[in-house]
Image (cartoon, rainbow, N blue to C red):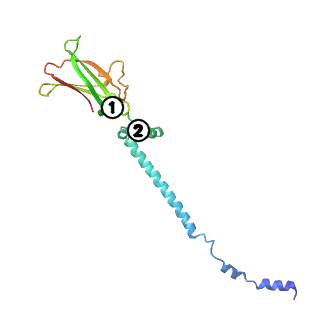
């Protein structure tokens, strides 16, 4: 036999079908690695949706509780940043309970008969400037019964050098001096308190 005939017989005797069945099934598209990748993507997307929902919920909570939260000194810088990003207005800081009344003194007016002069000092003990609070001026008789009471707003008691819409400085004494009508002989004691 010729060499060419031998090659033909070998080629014809070679069965490719047995080779195909013996190959491992490594290229299966439904393998566990592909399933894990799909699960990971779904999990990542779910977590992203949950994070966005939580951020949205937190944002709504902050927005609707802004008047209360804005009065907390620790939260104000964060809330200011929040309001710089979103269209909201931060409430003016107001803690009237942190305003102290000191050196209260009431005496007869030197020039006007039937009038009194009330002198006092206000000190803002809060950590931030705040609006001047309303004051309650009260006169009582010997038994502690109220004789006269008057609510004074900033425009009523601030000197002309200070505007009522100005903020009260922190830890700085603000002297107040105003004239009032004498409530009468029964008014033997007096007090000034900050309206809450």
Question: In the rendered picture of this protein, how many numbered marks are placed on residues?
Answer: 2
Q: Residue at x 40, y 42 (%)?
A: 63
Q: What SS does tag 1 mark? A: loop
Residue 179 vs 165, above or below: the answer is: above
Question: 102 or 152, which is in the foreground?
Answer: 102
Within the image, what quadrant is residue 172 found in? Answer: top left
Tell me residue 150's x, y (percent): 23, 24
**Numbered label attached to residue 125:** 1
Residue furthest bottom in the image: 1
Residue 54 vs 127, above or below: the answer is: below
Tell me residue 155's x, y (percent): 32, 22
Q: What SS does tag 2 mark? A: helix
Badge nearest the viewer, 2 or 1: 1
For label 2, the residue is: 76
Residue 32 vs 133, above or below: the answer is: below
The reply, left or right, for residue 62 in relation to residue 181 is right
The reply, left or right, for residue 107 in relation to residue 79 is left
Tell me residue 74's x, y (percent): 39, 40
Residue furthest top in the image: 111
The reply, left or right, for residue 155 in relation to residue 56 is left
Question: 99 or 41, which is in the foreground?
Answer: 99
Name the quadrant of the C terminus. Answer: top left
Tell me residue 57's x, y (percent): 41, 49
Comes first in the chain, label 2 or label 1: 2
């Amino acid at each position: 036999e010729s060499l060419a005939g031998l090659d033909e017989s070998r080629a014809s005797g070679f069965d490719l079908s047995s080779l195909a069945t013996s190959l491992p099934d490594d290229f299966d598209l439904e393998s566990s690695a592909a399933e894990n990748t799909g699960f990971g993507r779904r999990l990542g997307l779910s977590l992203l949706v949950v994070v966005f929902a939580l951020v949205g919920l937190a944002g709504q909570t902050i927005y609707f509780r802004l008047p209360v939260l804005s009065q907390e000194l620790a939260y104000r810088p964060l809330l200011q940043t929040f309001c710089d990003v979103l269209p909201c207005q931060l409430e003016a800081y107001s803690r009237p309970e942190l305003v102290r009344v000191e050196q209260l003194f009431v005496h007869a007016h030197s020039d006007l008969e039937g009038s009194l002069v009330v002198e006092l000092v206000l000190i803002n003990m809060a950590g931030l400037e705040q609006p001047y609070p309303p004051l309650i001026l009260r006169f009582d008789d010997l038994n502690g019964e109220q004789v006269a009471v008057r609510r004074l707003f900033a425009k009523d008691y601030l000197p002309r050098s200070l505007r009522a819409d100005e903020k009260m400085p922190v830890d700085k004494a603000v002297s107040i001096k105003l004239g009032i009508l004498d409530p009468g002989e029964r008014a033997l004691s007096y007090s000034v308190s900050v309206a809450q």
